[in-house]
Amino acid sequence: MNKRTLSSLLAVCLAVSAMGQSGSQSGTISPYSQYGLGVLADQSLSFNRGMGGTGLAMRGGTMVNPLNPASYSAVDSLTMLFDAGLSLQLTNFSESGTSVNGRNADFDYAVGLFRMYKHLGVSFGLLPFSDVGYSYSSSSYLNNTIGSIKETYTGTGGFHQAFVGAGWNPVKPLSIGFNFAYLWGKYNRSVSSTATTTVNSLSKSYKASVSSYNLTLGMQWQQPLNRKDRLTLGATWGLGHKLGADPTCEIINVNTSTLVSDTTTFTISNGLELPMSLGVGLAYNHGESLTVGADVSLQKWGSVDFPSYDDANNQYTLRSNLLQDRTRMSVGAEYVPDPNHPSNYFKHVHLRLGAAYATPYYKINGQDGPKEFSLSAGIGLPLLSKWNLQGFMRPLLNISAQWVHTSAKDLITDNSFRISVGLTFNERWFAKWRID
């Protein structure tokens, strides 16, 4: 037991290191990450992603589901679950007949779950929150006096969550839970301009560092319909609050002939904020073989003011109408032919399908940002051996493939193909072994 506990702690420490490194390199290459807090990360695990990220009403004793902390109460009393995953993404960006390809890989998550007391499950781990990562430039000709202006845009960073959560089943149909996370990270964004016929260059640098918390509450109500069928209703509520961060804007004007620079720095006290969020999900289960679910979630970004520099008045202030409410809808299904079959490997394979649609949470030059549509498929492969077919240990390799289409009128269109791989360890740490 002690060796296994130390192994899990070591895995979490390695996950922290990996997530810290991915934060410096960023888990995205999208130019849309220059808006708001960046591209919001998919906080589902590999098994959810095969079902379009659906999971608010899903619960089971062999999976960790941080999308709704109320699900933790379903964990088996004899097991310790640990799940870690990574992803690879290939993306094509296109605009006005021009096309560019890119790729990136990232460590995604590491989570664990165990039963502390009867009807009480406890989870812990690391999850992404958002990513910032882009680098591009554009040139335009103005007139003979100024000539051509080249503008270069770069950004790095991201935000992550280390969380602990619990799910409690006080009465048979009802489970409640919470996730309390330490939210940390930073972003660095810059815009620099140079003209061909003038000797001055101008750059603007936007920075912020966050060290705060994130709290999510969850509820699930599971209603049996008959001996095999059951219906589950799930709901979540995320607390909106200020992050205590002081974003800055630094403007540097450099005379490239004399190398004399003029620097102006603006700071907004407590200028970043998380919105309130709500989610509702419904899932149908037929025994342990079939699960079908659907989720709807809303993030109230429209009520959040965001820092912005006003060129006309030379001010860096909080502005409204830069962000907007974000809605996400998803459906998904999982099928396992016969999870209780004693010997046939293929009867234990998990097959998954899903789809999702999301509206943007930011605006670009006053118009809505791009909408997102995705299709996904996944498979769960039991890593079974002769002795663990009897149920002593059920490690599961989860692989999902997602196609994500992001587009808006007169803006960049990107089509991404994402492969996510997660490995779930389900070990019977708390079983009492008997030797005959």
Image: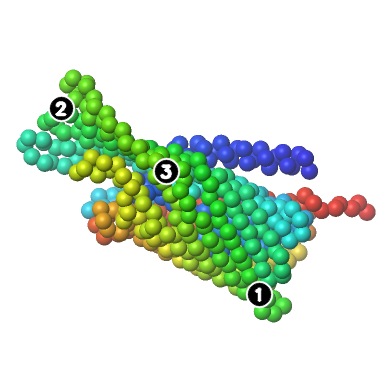
Residue 280, image x, y percentages: 52, 67
Q: Which mark is residue 223?
A: 1
At x 63%, y 70%, the residue is: 221
At x 72%, y 68%, the residue is: 171
Indicate the amino acid at tag 1.
Answer: Gln
Q: Is residue 201 above or below residue 340?
A: above
In which quadrant is the N terminus drawn?
top right
Q: Is residue 52 left or right of residue 38?
A: right
Q: Residues within 10 Å of mark 3 (few under 14, many from 20)?
A: few
Residue 425, image x, y percentages: 68, 50
Give the structural element (helix, strand or loop) at label 1: strand
Indicate the amino acid at tag 2.
Answer: Val
**213 and 280: which one is in front?**
213
Q: Is residue 360 left or right of residue 261?
A: right
Q: Residue furthest left?
A: 144
At x 28%, y 49%, the residue is: 99
Q: Is residue 17 above or below residue 103?
A: above
Q: Which mark is residue 199?
A: 2
**244 and 417: which one is in front?**
244
**Looking at the image, is mark 1 or mark 3 earlier in the sequence?**
1
Q: Which mark is residue 316?
A: none
Single out the mark in the foreground, 2 or 3. Answer: 3
Residue indicated by mark 3: 270
Quarter occupied by residue 230? bottom right
